[in-house]
């Protein structure tokens, strides 16, 4: 079947800008309709089908936000982006909150515009490919600048790609109402390019949620780069985020790309963003707004196209109120919030999580999966997990390490029954075993797993553990691991 080019609607009351946008999109292989106000836009939306829409914020007969709301209500499958005035951060944030998938600022940077268009058309193409028979593939236009052509939807056929979506979503284990709601929200967030702040207690799976948003979205084929902001030494932050040039400071022996350059085209996940010092928050805000970075020692800025997802187990609003976190950065990161439930809000998922984690541990350690007795399951469900899902995994790791039989019982999991409201952590040890012996068992198991994962290449195993080869070899000798 011959494919038709994407069809776009451009809404702007400035003739010169409409012409510039039309010319740029036409050169990318997009058919363009234009409208100069809301009335014309509504009429064309009512009589045509579009791959995406691009609208100005200020229109003669109303506000572009009204059009965004109407499109999301009447044409939810169609991505719509906003053109905002330069420096109008509030307008951009409002557009994203109303449902725009992205925005571009005046004066329009054509590289930014082209990136936005490619993302929009890919979103629509991905949606329509779900309706195609499994043996149909999109034709390559052969034009490096061209965007993928649209293929008419076939509603009578099944959706083979739906299973791919479910496979991705099912990486978040659970069937509770709380988790089902999270999955639905993630699907919606994946269609947007808006910044998302993922909140929740420690161990609730914030990085997992961020990776699902990325993998379900139009940037899935590009990098997903995650960084724990609290783990970067303050003096190295600027270099880590923005890169540096050779010779720009002592120890800069070569050029280095920062996190933004590494994530270019994809997603940058800023975990524990509350730990960023104030001076770094200013620099981060500027890069997010300008979409450009300058490496340390660099003379020019480099454009970057990165979607920002962030997370914190601390509530950011109180930090803003106490002047510990910049309000302008907070509102820029918190365009949409995704809150993850703690484990006490999804207790019915604990048996499923236990089964999954025991399989993961068995695979990592080269053993047959263990099972838990009914009493052990009840004990785990009654426990309060301050560390949530991560803590449950740690409890199961310890239980597998210390138990001898195929079935893990209540005594093997070693939860403190007198303090069920307190967290059982990896630091707690059985009464009949000393701390040193317990930790040595864990360390030995980690070394063995690292060797196995590295296919018994000692140098690679040491690198994965983040220790020197000499230290790794010493530990192998210490535990008699050959």
Image (cartoon, grey):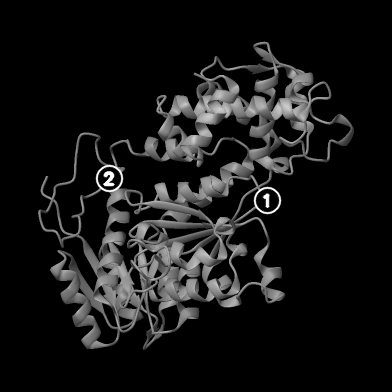
Q: Secondary structure at mark 1?
A: loop
- Residue drawn at (73%, 29%), measured in percent from left and top? 436
Q: Return the residue at label 1.
A: 201
Residue 267: image quadrant is: bottom left
Q: Secondary structure at mark 2?
A: helix
Residue displayed at 75% across by 22% down: 376
Observer-nearest of 99 and 221: 221
Q: Position of residue 118 (x, y in %)?
A: 26, 61
With 77 as the anchor, is 346 left or right in this view?
Answer: right
> Residue 136 location in percent, x, y?
19, 38
Q: Is residue 23 above or below residue 268?
A: below
* C-alpha span from label 1 to label 2: 37 Å
Quarter where residue 279 is shown: bottom right
Q: Along the line of sight, which residue is nearer the eye, 391 or 111? A: 391
User: Looking at the image, how many numbered discs can be counted on the residues?
Assistant: 2
Task: Classify the position of the N terminus by image quarter.
Answer: top left
**Residue at the disc numbered 2:** 129
Dot 1 or dot 2, earlier in sequence: 2
Instruction: Judge from the rendering whether residue 203 lies leftward or rightward of residue 373; answer left or right.
Output: left
Question: In the rendered image of this protein, does residue 348 appear above or below residue 188?
Answer: above
Residue lying farthest right? 418
Q: Is residue 396 visible?
A: no
| Residue 36 in view here | yes
Contact between marks 1 and 2 (CB within 8 A): the answer is no
């Amino acid at each position: 079947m011959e494919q038709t080019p994407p069809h776009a609607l451009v809404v702007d009351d400035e003739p010169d800008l409409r012409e510039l946008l039309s010319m740029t999109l036409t050169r990318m292989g997009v058919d363009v309709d234009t409208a100069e106000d809301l009335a014309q836009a509504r009429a064309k939306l009512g009589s045509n089908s579009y791959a995406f829409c691009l609208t100005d914020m200020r229109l003669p007969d109303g506000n572009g936000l009204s059009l965004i709301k109407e499109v999301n209500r009447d044409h939810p499958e169609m991505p719509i982006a906003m053109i905002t005035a330069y420096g109008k951060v509030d307008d951009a944030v409002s557009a994203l909150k109303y449902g725009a998938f992205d925005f571009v600022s005046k004066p329009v940077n054509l590289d930014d515009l082209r990136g936005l268009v490619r993302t929009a058309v890919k979103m629509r193409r991905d949606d329509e490919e779900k309706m195609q028979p499994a043996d149909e593939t999109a034709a390559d236009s052969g034009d490096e600048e061209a965007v993928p052509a649209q293929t008419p939807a076939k509603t009578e056929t099944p959706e083979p790609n739906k299973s791919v979506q479910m496979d991705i979503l099912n990486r978040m284990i659970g069937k509770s109402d709380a988790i089902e709601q999270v999955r639905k929200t993630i699907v919606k967030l994946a269609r947007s390019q808006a910044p998302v702040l993922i909140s929740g207690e420690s161990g609730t799976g914030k990085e997992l949620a961020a990776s699902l948003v990325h993998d379900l979205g139009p940037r899935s084929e590009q990098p997903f780069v995650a960084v724990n902001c609290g783990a970067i030494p303050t003096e190295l932050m600027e270099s880590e985020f923005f890169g540096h040039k050779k010779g720009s400071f002592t120890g800069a022996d070569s050029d280095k790309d920062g996190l933004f350059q590494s994530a270019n085209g994809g997603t940058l996940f800023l975990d524990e963003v509350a730990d960023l010092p104030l001076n770094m928050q200013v620099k981060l805000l500027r890069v997010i707004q300008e979409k450009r970075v300058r490496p340390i020692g660099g003379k020019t800025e480099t454009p970057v196209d990165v979607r920002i997802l962030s997370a914190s187990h601390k509530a950011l609003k109180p930090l803003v109120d106490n002047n510990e976190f910049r309000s302008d950065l907070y509102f820029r990161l918190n365009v949409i919030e995704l809150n993850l439930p703690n484990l006490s809000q999804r207790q019915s998922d604990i048996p499923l999580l236990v089964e999954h984690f025991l399989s993961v541990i068995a695979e990592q350690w080269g053993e047959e999966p263990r099972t838990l007795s009914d009493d052990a399951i009840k004990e785990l469900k009654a426990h309060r997990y301050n560390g949530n899902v991560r803590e449950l995994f740690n409890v199961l790791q310890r239980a597998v390490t210390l138990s001898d039989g195929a079935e893990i019982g209540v005594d093997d999991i070693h939860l403190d029954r007198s303090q069920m409201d307190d967290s059982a952590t990896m630091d707690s040890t059985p009464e009949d075993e000393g701390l040193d012996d317990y930790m040595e068992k864990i360390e030995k198991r980690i070394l063995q797993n690292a060797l196995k994962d590295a296919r018994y290449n000692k140098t690679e195993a040491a690198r994965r553990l983040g220790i020197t080869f000499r230290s790794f070899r010493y530990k192998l000798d210490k535990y008699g691991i050959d």
